[in-house]
Image (tube, helix red, strand yellow):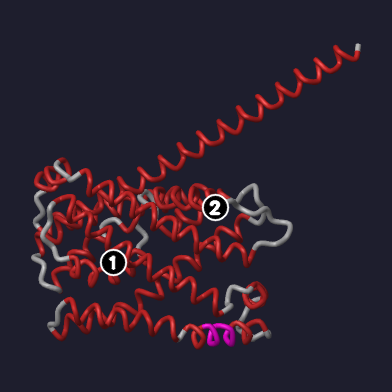
Amino acid sequence: MKMRSVVLTATSIVIGVLLIAAFISVAKVDPHATLRQLAGANRVAFLRLAALMAFNIFLSGLKWQLMDRVIRRESDAALSKSTFFAVTSAGVALGQLLPIQVSMVIARVLGTQLHGRALTRGTVGTVFDQGSDFLIVCFLIPASLLTHFSGSGPVVWLGLAVSMALLAIATVGGMVGVVQRLAAHFAAGAKAASNRWRRGCTDLIQSGLLERNLVRKLLGISILRFVVVVLMAGETSHAIRSTIPIWHLAAAMPFVVLSSALAITPGGIGVNEFTYATALSMFGTPLAAAAQWALANRALTAAAAFAVAICTAGGLLLSSSRKFYRRRNALEAAAKTEVATSFLRG
């Protein structure tokens, strides 16, 4: 099993590298110009990008926290808010080297390893976290397509996107109801369903994950995350002094998020770049400029993800060290007090 995982990981990395090479060739990107852009990137814009990355990770961790409260049993240990953030940041950083779906599951399962039912809490949390993001972009894609085919501009896209996002929130009850009925059908013992499938559907119904208010909160956070990701793309443009309009980035983003969810390459490498360049060109950005921006965005986003993960790990290590020394000093003080008391009594 481990060998199979290694082979699959190596294969996905090779595919990603080949896709990037093909992307550079097809889009006629000048790698040296991209490197010069990165070398001269605006540091303040990069710091803003890293701050937005941290906020995006916080929102992902918040969604996981909301779901964990529902599925956590009394025998499971609760996770602190800092742990939710730290584990999620590690998953995002690892997602630059592995497919994001795999990296988040690995990070969250390992992060809850000592807290009870790690596989369930890590896997279910990731499925619902990414699933709510996926659902929102499915609603936003029609807004981008209608804007493109009608030849409209930013005002029309924004109006359609807001309308579709509100529609997603408004139809939560109906969507949850459909899922509940399907789960109840299979849980009742449909002939085509295996025992494991029936048991899984029963657990889903009883877990509370299909509670309408919870799903509505998850979708609301996913909408906010989409806005943050667009702002991150805007900061990439500021960092490399690109002139791509931010509404082009926003309209292209649903296609990119969708491709990331389906990609098997590390962090969607290669797939994301092709999707960005194609989608941006749909809205009027020259292909060469879109392709060069996509490569720069890959590098700066990965750097921001690792920067947040490293700073978070360093902060946790420093906090743990302080707690250790405080505990040790307290024990030493208590021991000295005990010795002094014993001496006086003697």
The residue lying toward the viewer, choosing from 62 and 14, is 62
Label drawn at residue 139: none
| Residue type at tag 2 | Lys
Q: Secondary structure at mark 2?
A: helix
Q: Residue at the location (49% across, 85% down)?
A: 175
User: Is 326 a magenta residue?
Assistant: no
- Residue under numbered circle 1: 256
Residue 11 to residue 170: above or below: above
* Quarter of the figure with the C terminus: top right
Of the image marks 2 and 1, the number of the one nearer the N terminus: 2
Q: Residue at the location (35% across, 48% down)?
A: 305
x, y (%) of residue 153?
A: 14, 78
Q: Secondary structure at mark 1?
A: helix
Q: Which of label 2 and label 1 is nearer to you?
A: 2
- Residue under numbered circle 2: 81
| Residue type at tag 1 | Val
The residue lying toward the viewer, choosing from 107 and 176, is 176
Disc 2 crowd, CA 10 A, few/some/many (<14, 14-19, 20+): few
Disc 1 crowd, CA 10 A, few/some/many (<14, 14-19, 20+): many
Segment colored magenta:
176-182
Q: Is residue 329 visible?
A: yes
x, y (%) of residue 209?
A: 59, 73
Question: Could you say which quadrant of the image residue 265 lies in?
Answer: bottom left
Q: Are marks 2 and 1 in contact (CB under 8 Å)?
A: no
Side of 280 relative to 100 (left or right): left
